[in-house]
């Protein structure tokens, strides 16, 4: 099964020509010369204060992959290494995630799974061990106490498991059997100015529903412009 025709033999990677080019990123915000570092402003205040935490405000880092774990991603350990994987429901998500992982120095493979879904996974690597140590309690996934959401983490979460909900909402999907994660992830969303409604499995979830003009505008600002591979309707539009 291929990403474009869904009928060829699986490949280790999508064709290079289909990769979206790495997006240019602004440098990490630095302290102003001759002045103090800008203070953190509560997320519910009016204005655009969270621009400092947007997807374009820092270089890609392995720590950003916590955004995949906030959603449907999984991490497993083997000895001193770990592997991250996530199942997605559309081919464009595969292209985006493989490119995002490559931007962080991680090679990824993919393969088709049941129900026209695709599994994207990294190799086992020591680079991912700190992420696994922070998120795994035995075999159970749980956000660390210090977990927070940045623009880059939200961008990865949305690329893997975000879907628009017409007419004026957006769903950020959660791991189906990871109830212990749902509440602390909701707290992190609220701290980022994205308070959402938790939908249970019987309500079209598990997922957080983000609604309201101001919250959707903040989501669009934080995650940045849509990747080239994403359909226009699959990404929050900038106001």
Image (spheres, rainbow, N blue to C red):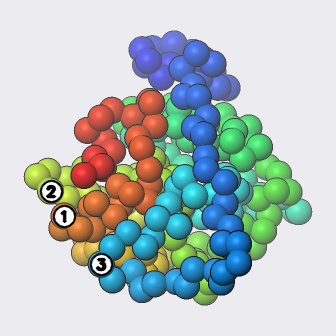
Residue on which the image places disc 1: 213
Q: Which disc is residue 56 wearing?
A: none
User: In the orientation shown, which residue stands out farthest toward the left?
Assistant: 167
Could one spot residue 88 in this view of the protein?
yes
Q: Using the image as rendered, state which of residue 239 and residue 105 is in the foreground.
A: 239
Q: Residue at x 28, y 74 (%)?
A: 196
The residue identified by callout 3 is 46
Quick check: can you spot residue 186? no
* Left or right: 166, with 188 as reference point: left
Pointer 3 or 1: first along the chain:
3
- Residue 57, percent from left and from top: 57, 58
Q: Residues within 10 Å of mark 2 (few under 14, many from 20)?
A: few
Q: Which residue is mark 2?
A: 168
The residue at the point 66 percent across, 54 percent down is: 27
User: Sequence order check: which comes first, mark 1 or mark 2?
Assistant: 2
Q: Is residue 116 above or below residue 211?
A: above
């Amino acid at each position: 099964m291929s990403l474009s025709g869904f009928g060829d033999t699986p490949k280790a990677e999508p064709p290079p020509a289909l990769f979206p080019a790495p997006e240019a990123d602004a440098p990490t915000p630095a302290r102003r010369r001759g002045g103090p570092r800008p203070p953190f402003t509560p997320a519910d205040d009016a204005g655009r204060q969270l621009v400092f935490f947007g997807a374009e405000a820092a270089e890609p880092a392995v720590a950003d992959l916590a955004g995949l774990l906030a959603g449907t991603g999984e991490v497993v350990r083997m000895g001193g290494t770990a592997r991250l994987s996530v199942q997605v429901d559309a081919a464009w998500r595969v292209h985006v995630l493989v490119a995002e992982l490559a931007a962080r120095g991680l090679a990824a493979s993919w393969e088709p799974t049941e129900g026209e879904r695709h599994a994207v996974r990294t190799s086992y690597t020591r680079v991912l061990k700190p992420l696994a140590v922070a998120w795994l309690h035995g075999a159970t996934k749980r956000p660390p106490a210090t977990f927070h959401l940045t623009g880059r983490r939200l961008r990865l979460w949305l690329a893997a498991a975000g879907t628009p909900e017409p007419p004026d909402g957006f769903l950020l999907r959660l791991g189906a059997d990871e109830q212990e994660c749902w509440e602390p992830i909701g707290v992190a969303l609220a701290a980022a100015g994205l308070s959402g409604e938790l939908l249970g499995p019987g309500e079209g979830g598990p997922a957080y529903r983000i609604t309201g003009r101001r919250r959707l505008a903040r989501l669009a600002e934080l995650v940045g412009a849509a990747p080239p591979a994403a359909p226009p309707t699959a990404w929050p539009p900038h106001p």
